[in-house]
Image (tube, helix red, strand yellow):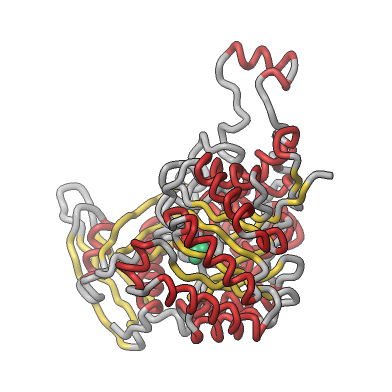
Amino acid sequence: MSKNILIFDTTLRDGEQSPGASLTVKEKIIIAEQLSKLGVDVIEAGFPIASPGDFEAVKKIAQTIEGPVICGLARAIDKDIDCCWEAVKYAKKPRIHTFIATSSIHRDEKLRKSKEEVIADAVQAVKRAKSYCDDVEFSPEDAGRTSLEYMCDVVSAVIAAGATTINIPDTVGYTEPEEFGNRIKTLFDKVPEAKNVVISVHCHNDLGNAVANSLAAVRQGATQVECCVNGIGERAGNASLEEVVMNLKTRKDFFDADTNINTKELFKTSKLVSNLTGLSISRNKAIVGLNAFAHEAGIHQHGVLQSKATYEIMNAEDVGWSGENIVIGKHSGKHAVMALLEEEGYSLTSEQNTQVTEKVKDLADKNKSVERDDVLAIAMDILGQLSETEQRIKLEGFTVTTGNGMTPTASVKLLINDQEKIGTGVGDGPIDALSKAVWSIVDPSVKLLEYNLKAITGGTDALADVSIKLKDINGKVFSGRAVHEDVIRAGLLAIISGLNRYMNAYNKGN
Ligand code: KIV
Ligand code: ZN
């Protein structure tokens, strides 16, 4: 009988650590709902001690998402584990995932702890987690660069302490597939108790080996793979969920393994994560890139027309390229809008659906053409809206003048923590002038890193979708986004939304 490989999705934890990918609680819940539809076995919902927002998101996901195990991450420190439990305890199937670094470089340079001290901390952490819940995962961080002998000693000790899943991370994406596969083989050879727990792998993609390393580990007996949708994550990212799953499915003859993933949900999940994180997918990305099933060369097209199998090793339908069914027109009501959003993986609350429908109608009434991507952009705009208390900066008004032979000049009136401030600026264009006006009254240490403007559909009446990235002095990146028919207002609102996220992260006044 073929073995079952558990898919542990860490899009909302490691994936969210991608620079600029920070998601709101609402956005995380939407993604978690879609991950549950996709059939992942475990959702790592966040790192509860990291920030109040992370805690809130893990707690909300634990309270609302049914199906998968809901897991939170915790360092091997009592307060992390206690906090993690407070967030995941609401789940039907909660898990605490605790970790400590084991490689000599991390022990010596980061932790300044001996091998014995690290083992003692790991055992203590697992025991504390175990006092709260049965399902405890342990990771020796940077296992890929840890001596095999010591890694096996650590694993043996934490299994004895009660860990039920042992995850072997290649934290810095350093290993090669054969080498990583051998590491898993040695683990089974040297630690016989390993066969009584789930052996998991978590590979980063710094050398582009994350998927190959994960699959090499599966060949050697690992039965859980940790991965992220679209391969997002720290630095070069994590193993891509869709690539791991489709390798196992397409080459079942080779791996003799199944997953619980409904692969028909892959494309939709990928698009949803890309839209909400703002991390776009390259056209040639395996499985979910726009070119993944496109044939350009005449010889290929000819072959595919004769028989798809000549150049296609997977069916496009199997990953959910089904074509788009619902079309939104001027007279579409709430149900059509809801159906379209559901089709795209967005399960919105009734109130959010009403807001989207109203905006769609509002646009249609102004005689603007409303297309599928407009509806998605409006939905994302509504999902990304900050709560009243999170809106530390509010736009009160602005003016811009520009023209041939004139220097673009702007003034902006903002309410910053309930105090009215007026800024002015001149720039190379109207947006530049407005951004200078904003920066004349907000924290100058935070810089505008990126400004992207997209006209969603064709025509001069197209909705403008602006996404921006800001960077603070600690190198932390914050994104902002806004959608509006007025391109200048969209730009200004996007900057303000990024600044609000920055101020919320540090709980700042100005
Ligand atoms: O890459 C890593 O080592 C991690 C651990 C916390 C599992 O993300
Ligand atoms: Zn990681």
Q: Which residue is located at x 66 percent, y 85 percent? A: 132
Asked where in the image residue 245 lies, by quadrant, the reply is top right
Say above or below: 486 vs 101: above
Q: In the image, 86: left or right of 331? A: left
Is residue 385 shown to the viewer in this render? Answer: yes
**Nearest the camera: 329 or 395?**
395
Q: In the image, 135: left or right of 404? A: right
Farthest residue, direction right: 1
Residue 226 position, x and y percent, is 59, 56
- The tally of labels here is 0
**Nearest the camera: 233 or 340?**
233
Is residue 485 shown to the viewer in this render? Answer: no
Q: Quadrant of the N terminus?
A: top right
Residue 187 position, x and y percent, is 59, 55
Say above or below: 170 vs 492: above
**Nearest the camera: 297 or 219?**
219
Q: In the image, 69: left or right of 503? A: right
Q: Quadrant of the C terminus?
A: bottom left
**Nearest the camera: 457 or 27?**
27
Residue 474 position, x and y percent, is 28, 69
Asked where in the image residue 96 lies, by quadrant, the reply is bottom right
Q: Which residue is located at x 56 percent, y 20 percent? A: 296
Q: Which residue is located at x 24 percent, y 69 percent? A: 473
Q: Which residue is located at x 47 percent, y 70 percent? A: 100
Residue 30 position, x and y percent, is 63, 65
